Amino acid sequence: MSTDASHEVRLAADTAASRAPRNTDDAGQQPGHKGGPRRKGLSERNRPLWMLIPGGALMIIIIVVPLLLGIYMSVLNLDQYTLRKWISAPLIGAENFVEAVTDSPLLHAVWLSVSYSLLAMVVTLPLGVAAAVATQNAFKGRAVIRSIFLIPYVLPSFVVATVWRTMLQPGGIVDEALATVGIHVGLWLNGPQTFWTLVLVQIWASWPFIYLLALSGLQSVDHEVHEASALDGALWWNKLRYVVFPYLKGPLSLAFLIGMLHHINNFTLPFVLFGVPAPSDVEVLPILTYVTSFQSFRFGLSAAMAFISLVLIAIPLFVYLRAVKLDDADTPGGKK
Amino acid sequence: MSTTTATRQGPATVQVDRPGSHRQHEVLRLLPGPLLVIVLVFLGALVLVPVLYIFLASVNSDIGVANGEFWPSTVTFENYSKIWTSVGLATGLTNSVLVAGATAVVSAALSVSTAFVLVRYTFRGRLSILRGLLALQSVPGTLMVLPVFVLFSSAATYLGIQVIGTQWGLFVTYLTFAMPFSTWVMVTYLRGLPKELEEAARIDGASNLGVLFRIILPLSWPGIVVSGIFAFLLGWNDVLFASVMTRPESQTAAVALQIFGASQEGGAIPYYGQMMAAALVCAAPVVILYLIFQRYLVGGLTAGGVK
């Protein structure tokens, strides 16, 4: 990444230099920014800020307002009888939160969600990197192979789940195939092994995402680096470990964060794979929140659970936002 | 992320050797030949066997699928004519195309203009908006579904606007949830466009709207296509909101298939063949879109960084 950065700085410097005379008024407007490129030279009155209104209004009405509404609902005693007139539903303070933590499967669900996400991640990372490393050099049919590798990622989750649900039926194709080599696993879609089923299907569906990001990392390796290590006669393993992998650190950390968020938030896969009510070993956070509101009609409790999971998600999200901010938000127009 | 995509198109990848030349091949190779083949075959099979199975099972008999056949003992294409009414795919696909299609078009249009303002103008709160766009991408749907549902049912109670159970409710929801990512894709795309053309147009006296329509739109259609497709996929793939906010006549294909699958529990042998046929039909538009626009989509994905 370091070479990219220097390349970018060079370009930025060029742009800044060529525009310097016109942009003197700009400097005071964004204090705290190092001398990045400054654009515009447009009068301030001429900014079409009204174009932000439609999108902004939508996001405020459909995301921000419901988010606040959800927080308010978490302190209400809300069930199917009081939902219709939720404004006058009885306030019960922190009771929902107390019940969620002490007397509901919430903590178990948090544990399931986190461990399943991590397990799936631990397997998808090497798979994705191996795939990226294998398709890095050009060979005949590489384009086809790349397309094939991305299929699981492109297939809708509900399709993936429906197909695996069929393949994992007792006596289905997976059981038959394993029986021919003498392995009998037992039930996939019921009972304690469902957790591992979920992990396996999630791995199948999400390794191509790691592959994509690893591939973009590999493409940032300068050709000179390849040349140099070829001249040095580095062994493939050493070359991978000491020359190539350092380039993957950034993209893979990003992939890790996004992947974790994606797994923890994944509702469709467990929902379609196991149906509701789900076996207790796959009652991950999204499923539990959904079941609590739309099966048990404990809306207040469910809102409390949702709030707790938001706090949980905020941790990787915060790290992610800090990581991305450096790349983009700080240097408006800095690319190219 | 956009750093890498930017440089990929930039001078950094101007290489001495033509891609595919023998020398370049040797220099870039990271794995010894046999290991390379093993990795490719393993991962290829991992993907292709289940994909092939979907097709084979969709032309198999239900008993064949239930008994774990990979190659069908009897081949029939009947399933493909049954699913339109049994699964309800005729209604489902119509609704999915309508809702996801409308989401794609409107979201692409809104995100271009939003991204244009965010990239080309400076104003107070601009960075907060950009950061907010990233944060909103990660707000989990399960968190939102109940409050949105309550909000929509309140709209019916207090304002007399019936939203729940209609395609409009889904459309507005998908549109909103697609906006953060679509806008982000457009932001990264517009950043890559040279500003010289716009400046020239402004010197010629073009207005803001003139610049947007005459300069930005024609230059940025690959980005627009990508952000539109992602919005389409969001609507097409969603089960959560659609399962709560639709009636049978406004059901999307995803929910139709999910309900059909869930209703097969217990009793006689499930209609596996029809399930697989319907799964294939639901996946087909997505896979075709992806194959056509693959080049742009992969770039957009790594630029946006999030699915």
Image: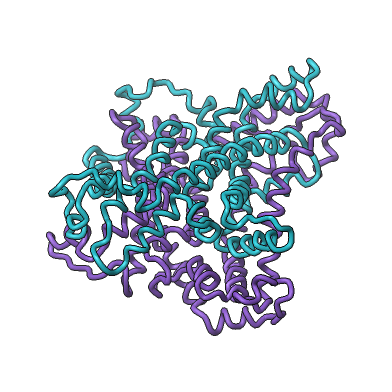
Q: Is residue A21 above or below residue A330?
A: above
Horizontal side of B70 relative to A245 (left or right) equals left
Q: Is residue B234 above or below residue B157?
A: above
Between A13 and B269, the one lying in front of the other is: B269
Horizontal side of A131 relative to A77 (left or right) equals left
Q: Residue B46 at what x, y percent from top left?
A: 28, 49
Q: Quadrant of the C terminus of chain A?
A: top right
Question: Which residue is at a point 36% across and 41% down the rendered structure image?
Answer: A133
Quadrant of the rendered image containing residue B44: top left
Q: Is residue B63 above or below residue B80?
A: below
Between B166 and A75, the one lying in front of the other is: B166
Horizontal side of A291 relative to A56 (left or right) equals left
Q: Does residue B59 show up?
A: yes
Q: Residue A321 at what x, y percent from top left?
A: 62, 53
Between A196 and B291, the one lying in front of the other is: B291
- Rendered purple, the chain in question is A
- Colour scheme used in the picture? by chain
Question: Which residue is at a point 41% across and 39% down the rendered structure image?
Answer: B285
Q: Does residue A324 show up?
A: no
**Visual hue assigned to chain B:** cyan
Q: Residue B175 at what x, y percent from top left?
A: 61, 46
Between A161 and B282, the one lying in front of the other is: B282
Quadrant of the rendered image containing residue B163: bottom right
Horizontal side of A185 relative to B183 (left or right) equals left
Image label count? 0
Q: Residue B18 at what x, y percent from top left?
A: 38, 20
Question: Which residue is at a point 32% across and 66% down the rendered structure image?
Answer: B265
Question: Which residue is at a point 36% across and 37% down the rendered structure image?
Answer: A147
Q: Is residue A278 above or below residue B274?
A: below
